[in-house]
């Protein structure tokens, strides 16, 4: 059973949250580095966290997240006020109008979200650990495919995680993490920070992981089975030959005239 001190929170309304929070942030929020009024706790529908690689206590109940993208179409050469999110809605990016720089010959930016197993990217600085999935955020102009390297003005990124969050982290290549100024939004499992650059994003937690009480039992069980098999083999090696010897029939006496032994006389 999961200890009560840890809240396994669900998502907070996906696209609706993105649109609502975008409006709030443009006026105040994370982009200016000021405190953000938190969203109401409990808003939206709670759904289980989707893990790339679930921990032991989730098991087969996990629904694996998938990559996905959203196209942002420029209006009169200017990117619109918009919120985009990963297919699982565990990552949301809000951009004010004009946040994306114009690019000759292109009128669309494709925002792509790819969930990543934290074990496949750089390790989080101890004593903290990764809190849920890492996400790679890519932005490319269409149709040219040229990358968007930086926004003109800051947007914000919101991440929902399974454990109580500590800090949001960023890495351009997923190898080394830098801490971002992090704001808790409504509950300790939803955090946000400024968004300026595509790359890898991850949240860490100071809470220790849940230890599997059954971890190692498989190894012990295997060793036990091996010892029993060896004992049985040794026992059979002693008992079986003995039983076979005892089960052999006694040879029957040879029928016919008895053989006389002739003694020679001494001369």
Image (cartoon, rainbow, N blue to C red):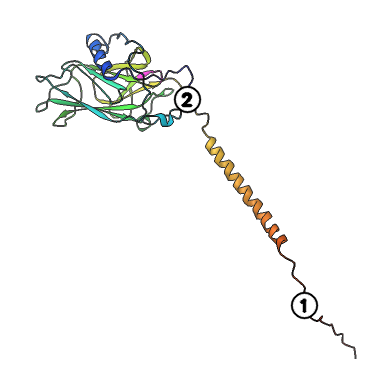
Tell me residue 149's x, y (percent).
Answer: 20, 25
Residue density around tag 1, few if under 14, some if 14–19, many if 20 or more, within 10 Å: few
Q: Tell which residue pokes out farthest to the front in this image.
A: 255
Q: Measuring 52% from the left and 31% from the top, which residue is drawn there?
A: 214
Answer with the quarter of the image where residue 144 lies.
top left
Tell me residue 128's x, y (percent).
Answer: 42, 22
Q: Is residue 217 left or right of residue 163?
A: right
Residue 78 in view of the camera:
yes
Task: Find out whether residue 147 is within the magenta segment.
Answer: no
Answer with the quarter of the image where residue 141 lies.
top left
Q: Is residue 114 left or right of residue 253?
A: left
Q: Earlier in the sequence, mark 2 or mark 1?
A: 2
Q: Is residue 118 depicted above or below 246 in this figure?
A: above
- Nearer the observer: mark 2 or 1; the answer is 1
Q: Measuring 56% from the left and 38% from the top, which residue is drawn there?
A: 220
* Secondary structure, magenta segment, majority class: loop
Q: Is residue 233 depicted above or below 181 in this figure?
A: below
Q: Secondary structure at mark 1?
A: loop
Tell me residue 192's x, y (percent).
Answer: 31, 16
Residue 174 in view of the camera:
no
Span highlighted in magenta in the image: 163-167
Task: Find out whether residue 164 is within the magenta segment.
Answer: yes
Distance in Å between CA atoms under marks 2 and 1: 83 Å
Tell me residue 174's x, y (percent).
Answer: 31, 29
Q: On the image, numbered disc 2 is attached to which residue?
A: 210
The answer to whether the residue labelled 2 contacts the one labelled 1, judged by CB atoms less than 8 Å apart, is: no
Answer with the quarter of the image where residue 264 lies.
bottom right
**Which numbered marker is on residue 255?**
1
Q: Secondary structure at mark 2?
A: loop
**Which numbered marker is on residue 195?**
none
Q: Measuring 25% from the left and 29% from the top, which residue is drawn there?
A: 68
């Amino acid at each position: 059973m999961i200890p009560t001190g840890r809240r396994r929170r669900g998502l907070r309304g996906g696209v609706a949250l993105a649109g609502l929070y975008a409006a709030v942030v443009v006026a105040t929020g994370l982009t200016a580095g000021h405190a953000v009024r938190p969203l109401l706790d409990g808003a939206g529908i709670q759904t289980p966290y989707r893990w790339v690689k679930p921990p032991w206590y989730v098991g087969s109940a996990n629904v694996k997240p998938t990559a996905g993208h959203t196209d942002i179409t420029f209006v009169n050469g200017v990117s619109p006020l918009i919120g985009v999110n990963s297919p699982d809605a565990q990552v949301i990016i809000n951009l004010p109008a004009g946040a994306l720089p114009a690019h000759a010959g292109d009128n669309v930016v494709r925002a792509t979200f790819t969930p990543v197993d934290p074990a496949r990217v750089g390790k989080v600085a101890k004593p903290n650990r990764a809190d849920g999935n890492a996400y790679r955020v890519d932005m490319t102009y269409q149709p040219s495919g040229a990358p968007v390297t930086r926004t003109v003005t800051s947007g914000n990124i919101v991440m929902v995680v399974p454990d109580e969050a500590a800090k949001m982290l960023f890495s351009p290549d997923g190898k080394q993490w830098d801490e971002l100024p992090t704001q808790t939004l409504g509950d300790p499992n939803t955090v946000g920070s400024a968004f300026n650059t595509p790359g890898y994003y991850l949240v860490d937690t100071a809470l220790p992981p849940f230890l599997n009480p059954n971890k190692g039992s498989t190894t012990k069980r295997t060793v036990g089975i091996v010892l029993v098999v060896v004992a049985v083999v040794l026992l059979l090696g002693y008992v079986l030959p003995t039983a076979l010897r005892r089960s052999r029939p006694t040879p029957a006496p040879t029928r016919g005239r008895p053989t006389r032994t002739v003694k020679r006389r001494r001369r």
